[in-house]
Image: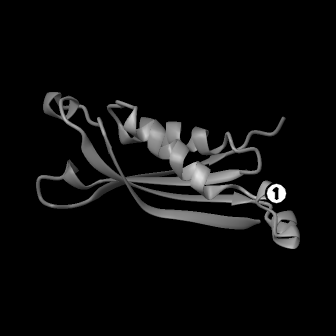
Amino acid sequence: MGKVKISSLRVNTIIGTLPEERLHRQQLIADLEFEYDAQAAASDDDLNLSVDYSAVEKQVVFLMENSSFALLEALAYAVGREVLTFPQVVRVRVTLTKPAASAYGAMISFTDEFFRKEA
């Protein structure tokens, strides 16, 4: 299995449970790592046999910019399911970091992994 990492993707979105968080976009940092069988793509040097990580990035940004979840967990689930719409992807790990979540300057993150369900 090959792995692709998209790191430090910065997206402004509506996220949070507090009333003031629902009024203004906040920056989240998304880190994605997804797995797929890269052997055919590597052997043939063919993007059509690979996962177009630029397309993954665009879809994730679009989803995040147009979402308004209360919880990082819910947004991470939506992002994970979105990445799994790419047919070659079998596993994705999503970490969302919310820099403004802590009153003490800590960066709060949530991480989960999502797998393609067997047919």
Name the residue nearer the viewer: 31 or 43: 43
Q: Is residue 81 left or right of residue 51?
A: left
Task: Determine whether the residue tagged by mark 1 lies in a helix, strand or loop.
Answer: helix
Q: Which residue position is annotated with label 1?
A: 49
Name above or below for residue 17 compared with residue 86: above
> What scheme was used to colour the molecule?
one colour
Q: Amino acid at mark 1?
A: Leu
Q: Is residue 95 left or right of residue 29?
A: right
Residue 78 image point, x, y percent: 51, 36
Residue 39 image point, x, y percent: 84, 68
* Residue at 70% from the left image edge and 44% from the top image edge: 86
**Crowd class of label 1 (few under 14; some 14 to 19; many from 20; radius 10 Å):** some
Name above or below for residue 11 compared with residue 118: below
* Residue at 12% from the left image edge and 59% from the top image edge: 104
Residue 111 image point, x, y percent: 46, 53
How many numbered callouts? 1
Q: Is residue 27 left or right of residue 10?
A: left
Quadrant of residue 119 within the rendered picture: top right
Residue 63 image point, x, y percent: 47, 37
Name the residue nearer the viewer: 67 or 76: 67
Name above or below for residue 74 compared with residue 98: above
* Residue at 77% from the left image edge and 65% from the top image edge: 1
